[in-house]
Amino acid sequence: MSKEKNEMLPTKSNWKIWVAGVVGFITGFVLCGIIVFTTISSLMIVTRESKLGFDETVAALEERIPEHGWVISGDQPIDMNKSMAKHGVIFKPRVKLVKLCNAEYAKDVLATDRHVSTMMPCTFSVWEDDGKIYLSKMNMALMAKMLGGNVAKVMGNKVVHDE
C-alpha cells in the first residue's frame, strides 16, 4: 500500500477522537434541551409582585388600561373562583383575569397572521399566594421574536411598549 493511502485509513486514535466528538455533541444537545425545558416557563410568563391589595390591583388595571388606548374585553375581569364554583369546583386563592384588546393592533396582526388569534386578547392575571398579590402576563417580547414577521413588528414593538 502506498504511503498516501495508508494516511487516509482510520487509526484507533482517530476513531477515539470521532467518538468523543459525537458523544460531546450529543451530550451538549441534551443539556441544552434540559436547560430550555426547565427555564421555559420563567421565560414565557412574566410575574411581578403587586404593592397593592388584590382588589386594588384589579382596580388599578381597570383604570390604567383605557388610558393607553386599550379596552377590557368582556367589560369586566373574569373571576376564576366564581367561574369554577359554577361547576362545583371550590378554589380558595383568588385569581382574576383581565383580558384587554387594542383593536388597531389586533387588526394589524390578524391581517397577516390569523393563527396568532389564539393569543388574543392579551391577558393579565392577578392572583394571590401566601398573602401576597401577583400580576402575571405573557412575555410578548419573547413571543414576538419567536413568531417573527408582522407579529414581531406589532406585538414586539407596539404591544410591548404599551404594556
Image: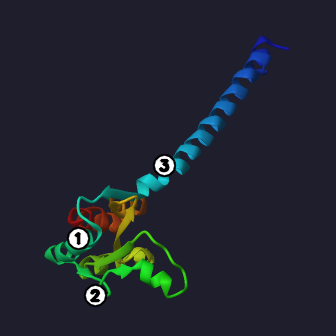
The tag on residue 56 is: 1
Q: Amino acid at mark 1?
A: Glu
> Closer to the observer: label 1 or label 2?
1
Residue ID for mark 2:
75
Q: Is residue 118 left or right of residue 77?
A: right
Residue ID for mark 3:
39
Asked if 51 appears above or below 62 in the picture, the reply is: above
* Label 2 CA crowd tier, 10 Å (few <14, some 14–19, many 20+): few
- Residue depicted at 17% across the width and 78% down the height: 66
- CB atoms at circles 3 and 1 under 8 Å apart? no
Q: Secondary structure at mark 3?
A: helix
The tag on residue 77 is: none
Asked if 158 appears above or below 88 in the picture, the reply is: above
Q: Reading the chain from its start, which is encountered first: label 3 or label 2?
A: 3
Q: Position of residue 123 (x, y in %)?
A: 35, 72
Quadrant of residue 34 in the image? top right
Asked if 103 appears above or below 95 in the picture, the reply is: below
Quadrant of residue 78 in the image? bottom left
Q: Is residue 14 visible?
A: yes
Q: Secondary structure at mark 2?
A: loop
- Residue depicted at 79% across the width and 18% down the height: 12
Q: Amino acid at mark 2?
A: Asp
